[in-house]
Image (cartoon, rainbow, N blue to C red):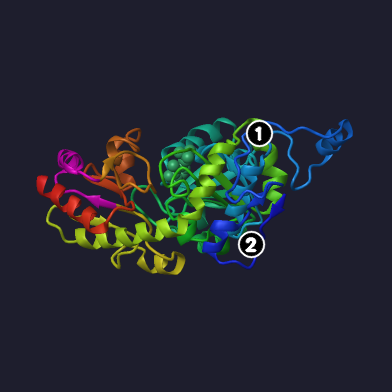
Amino acid sequence: MAKDSANDWNTRTKLVHAGSRRSQYGEMSEAIFLTQGFVYESAAQAEARFIESGPDEFIYARYGNPTVRMFEERMAALEGAEDAFATASGMAAVNGALFSQLKAGDHIVSAKALFGSCLYITETLLPRFGVEVDFVDGADLDQWRAAVRPGTKLVFLEAMSNPTLEVIDIAAVAEIAHAVGAIVVVDNVFATPIFQRSIALGADVVIYSATKHIDGQGRCLGGIVLGTREFIRGTFEAYLKHTGGALSPFNAWIMLKGLETLDLRCRAQAASAQRIAEALQGHPNVPRVIYPGLPDHPQAELVRRQMEAGGTMIAIEVAGGKPAAFRFLDALRIFRITNNLGDAKSLVTHPATTTHQRLSPEQRAALGISDGMVRISVGLEDAGDLVADLLAALEAV
Ligand SMILES: *Cc1c(COP(=O)(O)O)cnc(C)c1O
């Protein structure tokens, strides 16, 4: 199959063309190879392929598939990674990135502000298999310094925390981790691959839930792990292909088409988020607005250094606790109540009663998640309409 090469292209060009493969029909749009397997021209060819498959040779969709490979190569080109492996969901990516390289007796350090399922893996599953996990406040570099030790296998963190949008200094954490030989694994979902290049900042392995901005239209689950060719093909692929977390070719195609507009969508959504955050600041019913693009964000200087824009997410505190937050959510007409994010549709979540319900009130307090906190994912609608919807709903509070 003919392939497009991407090394000297800029982001927008890579997002449209990188990794494209064309069959003998010369189809213009990326084809969906909705096939579980591949036939061989001879028994000898089958034998040879099981010994070693070339870059354009496939065996079984759990191991790889041309449509999935296009998505992997486009993502690797975007992120500046040597290689990538796509997974059935973001959690298959997180699970694989950790379990593929850990064993009993290993020590890891993790930021404590994690997506619920990531917390389940680090807090409950890994210790069950004899992995020692220490948790730190990700924004406090002294805690990272104190927690790592010679022999620490890896550090794990979400670059921007959910829902309080705290930003972790990737370059500084990477320096601390690399000094003891630990691998840096970054879940970059909230920061997006458009606004933050974690590999360039020092991360060794980067993970995305493609379910979020990469699909961006709320259709499919998907995930991806990016890193060196040695890690992806030497360590990760063996784990994933034998444990069954492969991305379906149909979902890979949805993600590929999502990538074509990713840069445009993220920039439009971030511009609206900036405008909304500014419009809500100082509102009498909103004592606190957290948005990484605001000059009063606790890590505004780090955000300027590490990110190209403040992202597509905002967290606000609605005065009056849970009853007020619920009245606010119920009064919105454009924003939909759901727990997805990064979507074309603007979405709102009440973390204390949904995504972070499982935590104790003390744990929520320690993470800064109050009963009045509302998480906002800004979509592609008209920004003026979004501001008007939010302000009208705040009147109802
Ligand atoms: C959604 C999410 C995940 C999990 O992704 P799925 O595709 O839902 O499995 C992991 N990490 C973060 C930060 C997320 O937002």
Viewer-side residue, 310 vs 58: 58
Q: In the image, is 125 to the left or to the right of 58?
A: left
Amino acid type, callout 2: Ala
Residue 235 lies in what quarter of the image?
Answer: top right
Residue where numbered disc 2 is placed: 6
Q: Residue at x 37, y 61 (%)?
A: 310
Left or right: 81 as drawn, with respect to 112: right
Q: Please, what secondary structure does the residue beneath circle 2 have?
A: loop
Residue 109 at x, y percent in the picture = 53, 47
Part of the protein shown in magenta:
315-334
Residue 244 visible to an observer of this rendering: yes
Q: Going by the picture, which residue comes out furthest to the right?
A: 44
Q: Nearer the viewer, residue 5 or 326?
A: 5
Q: Residue at x 56, y 67 (%)?
A: 10
Q: Is residue 359 magenta?
A: no
Q: Residue at x 19, y 51 (%)?
A: 390
Give the crowd class for mark 2: few <14, some 14-19, many >=20 residues within 10 Å.
Answer: some
Q: Which residue is mark 1?
A: 62
- Considering depth in this image, is 64 or 324 the residue closer to the camera? 64
Q: Is residue 234 above or below residue 165?
A: above
